[in-house]
Image (spheres, grey):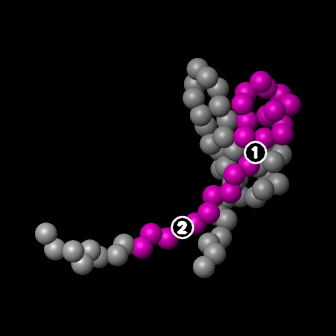
């Protein structure tokens, strides 16, 4: 089962402040933001990273103490 991409994040790092991760609904918007920020600042900017929906399945333990 493949889960869908729900959004994209771009990690923005500045040593004195820390890391920020703005979310974008599309890859195009995330790429534009990352490229524009790289052109205007000297911050460390990641490539857009997809956020993928997940499902957690809990299996009951059959082992008794």
* Magenta span: 34-57
Q: Which of the numbered marks, if any, corresponds to residue 54? A: 2
Task: Name which residue lies at 62% across and 63% down.
Answer: 52
User: Dot 1 corresponds to which residue?
Assistant: 47
Task: Name which residue lies at 79% across and 34% down.
Answer: 37
Against 47, residue 15 (above or below) is: above
Task: Name which residue lies at 42% across and 73% down.
Answer: 57
Q: Which of the numbered marks, if any, corresponds to residue 64? A: none
Look at the image and say whether residue 10 sits in the magenta stretch: no
Q: Image quadrant for the C terminus? A: bottom left
**Dot 2, how many residues are within 10 Å of its Cα: few (below 14), some (14-19), or many (20+)?**
few
Badge 2 or badge 1: first in the primary sequence: 1
Q: Position of residue 45 (x, y in %)?
A: 73, 36
Look at the image and say whether residue 49 sits in the magenta stretch: yes
Against 35, residue 4 (above or below) is: below
Q: Position of residue 40 (x, y in %)?
A: 83, 28
Q: Secondary structure at mark 1?
A: loop
């Amino acid at each position: 089962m493949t889960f869908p991409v729900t959004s994209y994040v771009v990690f923005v790092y500045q040593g004195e402040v820390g890391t920020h991760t703005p979310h974008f609904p599309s890859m195009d918007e995330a790429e534009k933001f990352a490229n524009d920020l790289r052109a205007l600042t000297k911050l460390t900017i990641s490539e857009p990273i997809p956020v993928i929906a997940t499902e957690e399945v809990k299996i009951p333990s059959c082992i008794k103490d």
